[in-house]
Image (spheres, grey):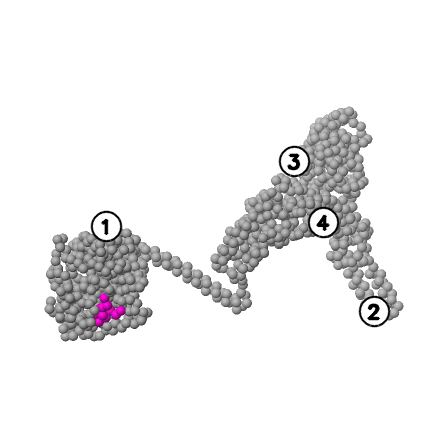
Amino acid sequence: MQRLTASLARTSVQRPRLLAQGPATRIVPILSNSSCSRVRSGYASYRCASSLVNHGLLNDIERRDDAVHAVGSSLLLDAGGRRPARLPGSNSGANSGSSSGGSESGSNGGNGSGNGVQKVSVPKEYPQTLAIPLTRRPLFPGFYKSLYIKDPQVIAAVQSLLDRRQPYVSIFLTKDEKYEPDTFSDTNEVYPVGVFAQITSVYNAGPDDKALTVVVYPHRRVTLDSLLPLPETAAAPAEKPKIDAEVSGVAAASSGRVFESVDAEIIQADSKEGLAEALREMAVTENAGKGAAEVIEPEKIEAVTEDPRGYTPINKHLGDHIVSVVNITNKVDSEYNPEDPIIKATIAEILNVLKEISQLNPLLRDQILTFSIQTGGNAFQDAGKLADFAAAVSSGEPAELQSVLESTNIQERLQKSLYVLKKELANAKLQQEIAKSVDQKITRKQQEYFLMEQLKGIKKELGMESDGKDKLVSKFKDRAAKLLMPEPVKKVFEEEINKLQNLEPSASEFNVTRNYLDWLTQIPWGTHSKENFDIKHAMEVLDQDHYGLKDVKDRILEFIAVGKLRGTVEGKIICMVGPPGVGKTSVGKSIARALGREFFRFSVGGLTDVAEIKGHRRTYVGAMPGKVIQALKKVQTENPLIMIDEIDKLGRGHQGDPASALLELLDPEQNSSFLDHYMDVPLDLSKVLFVCTANSLDTIPGPLLDRMEVITLSGYVAEEKVAIAMKYLGPTARESSGLKPEQVDLEEEAIELLIRSYCRESGVRNLKKHIDKVYRKAAFRVVSRGQEAEEKLKDAENAKGEKGETVAAETTVAMEQLKITKDNLKDYVGSPKYTSDRMYDVTPPGVIMGLAWTSMGGTSLYIESVLGSVISDDSKPSFHRTGQLGDVMKESSSIAYTFSKAFMAHHFPENKFFDKASVHLHVPEGATPKDGPSAGTTMTTSLLSLALNTPALADVAMTGELTLTGKVLKIGGVKEKTIAAKRSGVSNIIFPASNRADWDELPAYIKEGLTPHFVGWYEEVFKVVFPALEMKK
């Protein structure tokens, strides 16, 4: 003991000196050879190293501790910032000594002999300590940890321990993770098993240095036996001692004073008396030092006495502070067999898991390396320590780690440590996968960003820089500011514009959103064209563009008059029905011009895709809105006139029924909130005027036809066609051919012949083609004559006086106006297509002229009946019909045959023709399908004419449906059939009596030259057609 005291006395003043620097400056230690000679053992070497970093490197320790704590592991560094080569223990000084420590130190450490401390360790028994509660995770023996203390009483108690060279505390894990105080008043607040730890260094922390950070080193497991009652009052905390740097080995930096346990060498005592004696000798040694601010005198050390419970109150002075003081006993591991196969297998598995973790987590890799060095590469020799290490580096639950700490059975502790270590491995793998995935995404985005920036730079250099995302957003917002969007549309616009701002230009959805916003901001929200309600102006426009069409013009004028009275024109749906070429489309343009509205036309003929009407879903590539939205975008007004052409030729396929899609569009009650699939916002189409065109109403679905106002455009008669040709078609064709009126003159007689022999159609489209052809031929002749005149003029310039005058006169005659007459019309349009207006100039018995309606207008329809075979006594009656007749017309022929037999039996009973005759009825032009009931009277008259062998009047045409009893029913197409009859040159026309009102509405020029006969029963027809025959009553 004298030797130990002398050694302490010699070395107590040989402490390293630290150079104090500024607040943000690191403390740099300055060591002398003599200070390093103090290193005599594994733990003494820690003292020399800690002198280097206790102040300057402690921050590094804390930072590394925080980093490790993030993954649930503890530090493996010693208080000096290094990894300890060997944990303090009771080994001999085989590794101690200094290479330059003086004569008494031994050579290269020798075998530990010399004048140094021979046995360095902690006390084996330390029954009463200051207890500090710990949250989140327990401490394990052999692993440093920093504690943050805020309680002034606990801070004062720690200072008292350091002052008395008794830097020992016990640390227990709290059961409540949210526990904050630095003391506890009940043993149930903490787990019963903790660690006995040594304070290695402290330093001020927190605001105004009112807190303390304490670095501790746990030595062993201990069990909490009892908690001493907290004193009701405590002595005022003493002022913090100012320990000289020469004594403490630590310099005070401006950022806070740091204190270190003055003597880290703890003398292990085998008994309580030996412990007290050692403490006294340490005090005597320290008292020999010079410059110490406060030294505990040997006589101040309290006597070691035993209390009734058997505990030695070494820290009785802690009673001056309101702190937790506990009585503890060591918790010793149970004996185990290192060669146990289960233990060896568990250790091997732990090592394998640690190896995998070291490859995944760089922070743990260094700790595992340090642990391997400490154990000398043989972890099988200390299984308990390996289990503690595995638990210390794991981020398990506090209860799981505490269970490892409480286990004294090595096999059980190893298995529990393996469990938490496996969880740590799973977390590390998951963390690596997440990090890898994030890194890949970040790398890809960085590459895309880099390439996009390069692309922008290249485009900028080439002058090809396009509008960026900000410019697009600004453009769309500027457009929207000029529109009167409804609130639902504004909401959608804001959502889409925000989406566009958050999307990358390279994203596929960026283009979809940009296109949608482009359409949304190009619809004329709240924009209307000013309407013209001047009826006089409308009449002038309609008369300028079209001849006739009184019904259509009257309807448009009525429409304008209503709008003028109401101040606004609501959208209507008008359907104009008529044969091709009568001017349905051009009438729509004239209506738009008369009203002052914009005009848009699209055809639905053959349309089979609903998306053409209602648009595509935006999810499809290349999606677009429907035709109506496209119309609004083009005309830039909410009240245009939209013409839907060929509505009777709508198709139907696997992509839906467009006719059904038009129901919503053409319903005034529904189209105020029309929803296009692409736009997905309601649009008000109630101000739009829809005009539809059709050649026939038969193929238009009933619900759709019910929503439209039908205006019928009948075919033109010859007089109307002549007027249209003279007033519209002729001047237009002449101007388009580059001719002037003084060059070509198309006479009216030539136009009449053209209509009669070439263009008998109800419309004027074919007439226009022929007139264009006439003027093209005329242009060719004019140019040819002009070239001949130029050649003659050149020859005349080379001739002499009189001859030249003669040539000039001939040239003048050659340049006269070119006249096109009925005589030379054939030279321009070829041979006549129709050589006769009638198929029969004189109709034989069995042939009658009927009248039919087609999509091309009215036409004459002849019915022929002949006797199939010679009548004999063996003949049997039969009836056969041909001419590609429809079902309705076949039924009509059957009715006519039956009625004819009954009529003959009733009025001509002596005539037995139908009793033996084989009759064949035929309708010419067999390639043309025919159907309808209006030929009933015509067929009956043909059969009676054959049976009576009497021809009908040659100038009679008829139409009408016939019942089985002889009643004549109403038919349609009166105007068209009248025009056809007049064109065929008849003077008498037979109509059902029910069609008298339709006849009265016809213009006078159409009825001119025709004598109508309105009949209700067939007997009246018979009297007109066969005036010479008398029927028997």
- Is residue 943 visible in the rendered image? The answer is no
- Between disc 4 and disc 2, the foreground one is 4
Q: Is residue 335 above or below residue 46?
A: above
Q: Which residue is mark 1?
A: 188
The answer for how far apart the CA atoms under marks 2 and 1 are is 138 Å
Q: Residue visible at 25% across and 62% down?
A: 214
What's the residue type where badge 3 is placed?
Asp
Residue 797: numbered disc: 2
Name which of mark 2 and mark 1 comes first in the sequence.
1
Tell me the element at label 1.
Answer: helix
Callout 1: few (<14), some (14-19), or many (20+) C-alpha neighbours within 10 Å? few
Does residue 1024 appear to the left or right of 315 in the view shown? right
Q: Position of residue 507 (x, y in %)?
A: 48, 57
Q: Residue visible at 21% across and 75% down?
A: 33
Q: Is residue 611 above or below residue 802?
A: above
> Secondary structure of the magenta portion, mostly?
loop
Name which of mark 4 and mark 3 comes first in the sequence.
4
Residue 477: numbered disc: none
Name which of mark 3 and mark 1 comes first in the sequence.
1
